[in-house]
Image (cartoon, grey):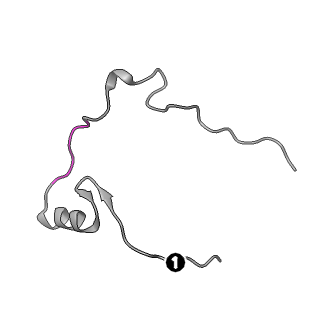
Amino acid sequence: MTPVAVTGLGVVSPFGAGVKAYWDGLAAGTCAIRPVTLLDPAARGPTGWRSSPPARRSTTRA
């Protein structure tokens, strides 16, 4: 096993960035679900929001 060092705690959530914003939102019992407004639906391509094709598995063997 590889040793791991945890150096801090961080949260990015619909309530905001940071543990305090996350905890305050949870403690207040507010709902953070909102409509998506930062994406332009007209910019969606024929294959969806993905901007590049999925990665392919290598078939070569060593």
> What count of labels does the image hold?
1
Mark 1 surroundings within 10 Å by alpha-carbon count, few (fewer than 14), some (14 through 19), many (20 or more): few
Q: What kind of residue is marked 1?
A: Ala
Pick the quarter of the image with the N terminus.
bottom right
The residue depicted at 58 percent of the width and 31 percent of the height is: 53
Image: 28 above or below 34: below
The residue depicted at 28 percent of the width and 68 percent of the height is: 19
Image: 62 above or below 17: above
Image: 3 above or below 59: below
Residue 55: x percent and y percent? 63, 39
Q: Secondary structure at mark 1?
A: loop
Q: Which residues are magenta?
A: 31-36
Q: Characterize the magenta stretch by its predominant secondary structure.
A: loop
Residue 9: x percent and y percent? 37, 71
The residue depicted at 34 percent of the width and 21 percent of the height is: 42
Residue 24: x percent and y percent? 17, 66
Identity of the residue furthest to the right in this view: 62
Residue 59 or residue 18, whichever sits in front: 18
On screen, residue 3 versus residue 38, left or right, reads right
Location of residue 38 (image quadrant): top left
On screen, residue 8 versus residue 33, left or right, reads right
Residue 40: x percent and y percent? 31, 27
Q: Is residue 32 magenta?
A: yes
On screen, residue 57 versus residue 15, left or right, reads right
**Which residue does the numbered mark 1 point to in the structure image?**
5
On screen, residue 11 versus residue 30, left or right, reads right
Image: 61 above or below 42: below
